[in-house]
Amino acid sequence: MKILVAILKKIKSFLLKINFIQYYVFVRNLLKNPHYLEVKKLTLKEELKTPTRTSIINFLLSLKAKETLYLEIGVRNPSDNFNHIKSNQKYSVDPGKEFLENPVDFKMTSDDFFEKLSKNEILYNHIKFDVIFIDGLHLANQVDNDINNALKWIKDDGFVVLHDCNPPSEWHSRENYSYVNTPAEGYWNGTTWKAFIKWRSNPDLYSCCINSDWGVGVLSKKHQIGKRINNTNHFYEYNILEKNRKESLNLIEFNDFKKILQP
């Protein structure tokens, strides 16, 4: 019996060594994989871009001669953006799934917020905002809903602004945020870009995407910041976005964007 136990221990030790070697080889190959290294490089490049979404939003608000009204959908931690927005009045909406303290004005989903707003149960149903910033659930269907609702509640010369419209790789644009064992790790833009491109083809809107801070999309009813597109990416495939990124998103540098609004 003792001999059998000793043999089993040796077998177990041997198998553990094999697993360790296999793991080592796997990780080594992964870290040397050109695709993995390229995605890591793209992440670093995006992190270094300026200005931030906060600066872009504050610029848009600064264009208004009168008192401004701002709404933020998807706040998470207010210290990230909301607290730094310079507006005479501002409101925040977040269900608090990612930041349990959730010190926002309306602790609910954006769908519930807009429904209650339309029923005159919160604020007042003739309110109009100068800027509505959408940074909630980064999935195309929800972003599409948020855009549709936001357009009903902005002023004629207002702006709908979206974060995460320009994912640098397919890993950044994955649908499942929790799947972080990718070259993009915890960085996640989701499928926001799909909803943005859908609305880019709307003939009643002007739009562009500022090439900074993971892509800051801007929609406007009045300001001619970019003409509509004929969307040829009918199935919203990432590889097609990659080939036609500049045209599809109307990707623009911030200084050029400012020149359009401040000629």
Image: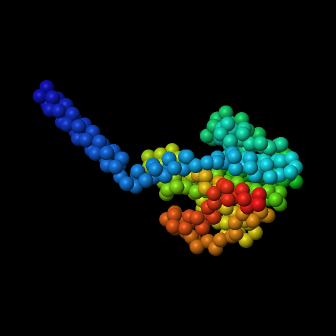
Horizontal relation, residue 221 to residue 126: left or right: left
Q: Position of residue 185 (x, y in %)?
A: 47, 46
Q: What residue is rendered at 68% in x and 42% in y? A: 81
Q: Position of residue 260 (x, y in %)?
A: 73, 61
Q: Position of residue 162 (x, y in %)?
A: 67, 54
Spot the residue most to the left.
3
Horizontal relation, residue 6 to residue 19: left or right: left
Q: Quadrant of residue 207?
A: bottom right
Q: Position of residue 53 (x, y in %)?
A: 66, 48
Taking depth in this image into account, of 11 and 149 the one nearest to the observer is 149
> Where is the C terminus found, in terms of image quarters?
bottom right
Taking depth in this image into account, of 222 and 20 the one nearest to the observer is 222
Q: Is residue 104 above or below residue 165?
A: above
Q: Quadrant of residue 24?
A: top left
Taking depth in this image into account, of 38 and 190 the one nearest to the observer is 38
Horizontal relation, residue 71 to residue 140: left or right: right
Q: Is residue 192 above or below residue 239?
A: above
Do we see residue 246 in this rendering? yes
